[in-house]
Image (cartoon, rainbow, N blue to C red):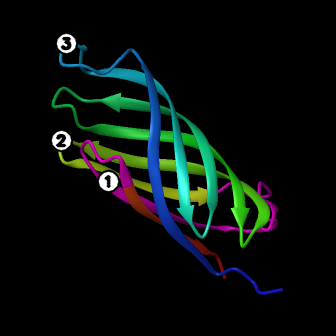
């Protein structure tokens, strides 16, 4: 069995439910909670759901933290893991850094530890992601 050292691919946003809902009339500064779903392609073929909390500043920039459960397949074998998110956003887009929650990997990703992330422009529906194994 080959040890996985790096995973990459694309993520496609499929749903976003934020409360209080983001729109031009939403007050700032504020905290918001979002449940977001994605479809992953590439080295991981699967889906995920994340729970995030965002702080919006008066200029609509901000920070986000969250947890995402990713389930799917790696090389045709069942696999899953949980990612911890930290990110920043502004009018141009979002930058998110991930770290794998220790002990959360299952199947082909059992024991996987590492980090990575993605950068997406505002209103992107799909972007490239990367996850690197520690050590």
Marked residue nearer the N-terminal end (1 or 3): 3
From the top left corner, tell me how far across and down residue 117 is, in percent: 46, 61
The one nearer the camera, 40 or 28, is 40
- Of helix, strand and loop, which one carries label 3? loop
Magenta stretch, residue numbers:
100-126
Q: How many marks?
A: 3
What residue is shown with label 3?
25
| Residue at x 21%, y 31% (from the top left corner) | 60
From the top left corner, tell me how far across and down residue 33 is, in percent: 47, 24
Q: Which label belongs to residue 91?
A: 2
Marked residue nearer the N-terminal end (2 or 1): 2
Q: Is residue 59 left or right of residue 121?
A: left
**Badge 3, how many Cα within 10 Å: few under 14, some, many 20+?**
few
Residue 105 part of the magenta segment: yes
Q: CA distance from mark 2 to mark 1?
A: 11 Å
Marked residue nearer the N-terminal end (2 or 3): 3
What residue is shown with label 1?
120
Quadrant in which the C terminus appears? bottom right
Quadrant in which the N terminus appears? bottom right
């Amino acid at each position: 069995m080959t040890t996985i050292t790096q995973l990459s691919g694309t993520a496609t946003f499929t749903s976003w439910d934020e409360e209080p809902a983001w729109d031009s009339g939403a007050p700032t500064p504020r905290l918001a909670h979002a449940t977001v779903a994605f479809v992953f392609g590439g080295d991981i073929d699967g889906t995920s759901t994340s729970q995030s909390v965002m702080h919006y500043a008066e200029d609509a920039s901000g920070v986000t933290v969250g947890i995402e459960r990713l389930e799917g397949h790696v090389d045709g074998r069942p696999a899953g893991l949980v990612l911890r998110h930290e990110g920043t956003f502004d009018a141009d887009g979002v930058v998110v850094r991930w770290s794998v929650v220790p002990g959360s990997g299952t199947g082909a990703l059992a024991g996987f530890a590492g980090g990575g992330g993605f950068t997406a422009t505002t209103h992107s529906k799909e972007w490239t992601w990367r996850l690197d194994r520690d050590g």
